[in-house]
Amino acid sequence: MRTISYIIRKEFIQIFRNKTMLPMIFILPIVQLLVLVYTATFEMKHIDMVVVDNDLSRDSRRLVSKFEGSPFFYVNGFTSSMEEANELLTTDEAHIILVIPRGFGKDLIKEGHTDIQLLVNAINATTAGLTYA
């Protein structure tokens, strides 16, 4: 315990002895906070999406049109095969795949809700987390 108190005392003496060290300790972190706060943004505006529509109903088209109307999502294309959609995901041509199952429209009318699948490319963890949220 005496060793730690000795080191702390020595460091305080060193800080106040060297006058150029005081601004570096207090002002430099504040300047970094003010400058770097504007460089980091977590807003995603162009998320490439591929749609696998296995239902081809009016309700599934309406769901896709909601995504197309959003400023955050860009529908790259439609496909009926999961292999082709996975290929687009692995080649980084799409960030997410929206899979609409068969019977989507019927389940939506009958039960009032239904399930869809969203496959997210997790290579960029920040993008994947924000897309999934």
Image (cartoon, helix red, strand yellow):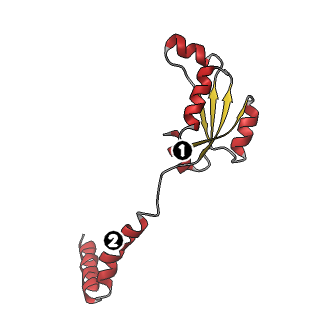
- Image coordinates of residue 133 in percent, x first then y, are 48, 40
- Confirm or deny contact between disc 2 and disc 1 (CB under 8 A): no
Q: Nearer the viewer, residue 78 or 89?
A: 78
Residue 36: x and y in percent read: 43, 66
- The first of marks 2 and 1 along the sequence is 2
- The quadrant of the picture occupied by the N terminus is bottom left
The residue shown at (32%, 84%) is 21
Q: Which residue is mark 1?
A: 72
The location of residue 20, given as percent across then percent down, is 32, 87
Q: Secondary structure at mark 1?
A: loop
Of residues 65 and 125, the one drawn nearer to the viewer in this rendering: 65
Whole-number angstrom distance, CA of label 2 to CA of label 1:
33 Å
Q: Is residue 1 left or right of residue 36?
A: left
Q: Amino acid at mark 1?
A: Phe
Amino acid on which the number 2 mark rests in the picture: Ile
Q: Give the residue at mark 2.
A: 30
- In which image quadrant can residue 47 be found? top right
The spot of residue 59 in percent (x, y) is 59, 21
Image point 74% across, 40% down: which residue?
Answer: 87
Identify which residue is drawn at 50% across, 45% down: 130
* Mark 2: few/some/many CA within 10 Å (<14, 14-19, 20+): few
**Relative horizontal placement of residue 7, taking residue 94 as reference (left or right):** left
Q: Answer few, some or many: residues within 10 Å of disc 1's Cα (few below 14, many 20 plus, some between 14 and 19).
A: some
* In this rendering, position of residue 79 left or right of residue 15: right
Q: Nearer the viewer, residue 83 or 22?
A: 83
Q: Which mark is residue 84?
A: none
Callout 2 secondary element: helix
